Amino acid sequence: MSTSVVLPTIKPTEIVQLPSDGFDFTSSLAEGETLTGAPTVTVTVYSGTDANPSAVKSGAASISGNAVLQKFTGGLSGVVYSVVAGCATSLGQYLEQWAYLVVI
């Protein structure tokens, strides 16, 4: 299952966790189901030019409760990035959420 998230814009000099409470998968989990394993966050360019879009991630993704956490930094002004956060669950699902990250 894939759902979308709205992210605020960032400036190239900021280091922020987006969304502030993480990519929350609570509504996609059955009772007692949990996120497991190593979550992934992939970043590609949706609009504009950046030869190294994955550099907008700051550190590794992690799990906190029912959310995948990821910090973002840098990026190039005027570029819109496509972000996909994914994680396996204790009941064998693989869930994803996607968002657009705009750097101003």
Image: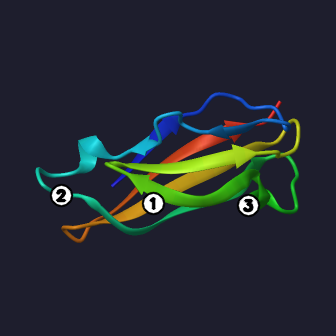
Q: Is mark 2 on a helix, strand or loop?
A: loop
Q: Is mark 3 on a helix, strand or loop?
A: helix
**Looking at numbered disc 1 in the image, what kind of residue is underneath it?**
Gly
**Looking at numbered disc 2 in the image, what kind of residue is underneath it?**
Glu
Q: Name the residue under label 2.
A: 33
Instruction: Tell me which residue sits at (32%, 48%) in the image.
Output: 66
Q: In which quarter of the image is the N terminus?
A: bottom left
Q: Which of marks 2 and 3 is nearer the N terminus?
A: 2
Q: What element carries label 1?
A: strand
Instruction: Tell me which residue sits at (15%, 52%) in the image.
Output: 30
Disc 2 crowd rating (10 Å Cα; few below 14, some 14-19, many 20+) is: some
Left or right: where does residue 49 sit relative to residue 46? Answer: right
Q: Quadrant of residue 74?
A: top right
Q: Which of 90 and 80 is in front in this view?
A: 90
Left or right: where does residue 34 sit relative to residue 67? Answer: left
Image x and y of residue 26, in percent: 27, 43
Above or below: residue 72 compared with residue 87 = above
* Tag nearer the camera, 1 or 2: 2
Q: Nearer the viewer, residue 49 or 28?
A: 28
**Pointer 1 with pointer 3, Cβ within 8 A:** no
Image x and y of residue 38, in percent: 45, 70
Q: Earlier in the sequence, mark 1 or mark 3?
A: 3
Left or right: where does residue 9 sit relative to residue 78? Answer: left
Q: Distance between the residues labelled 1 and 2?
A: 15 Å
Disc 1 crowd rating (10 Å Cα; few below 14, some 14-19, many 20+) is: many
Above or below: residue 35 compared with residue 2 = below
Q: How far apart are marks 1 and 3 (CA)?
A: 15 Å
Q: Name the residue under label 1.
A: 86
Image x and y of residue 18, in percent: 58, 38
The colour scheme used here is rainbow
Image x and y of residue 91, in percent: 18, 67
Q: Mark 3 points at which residue?
A: 54
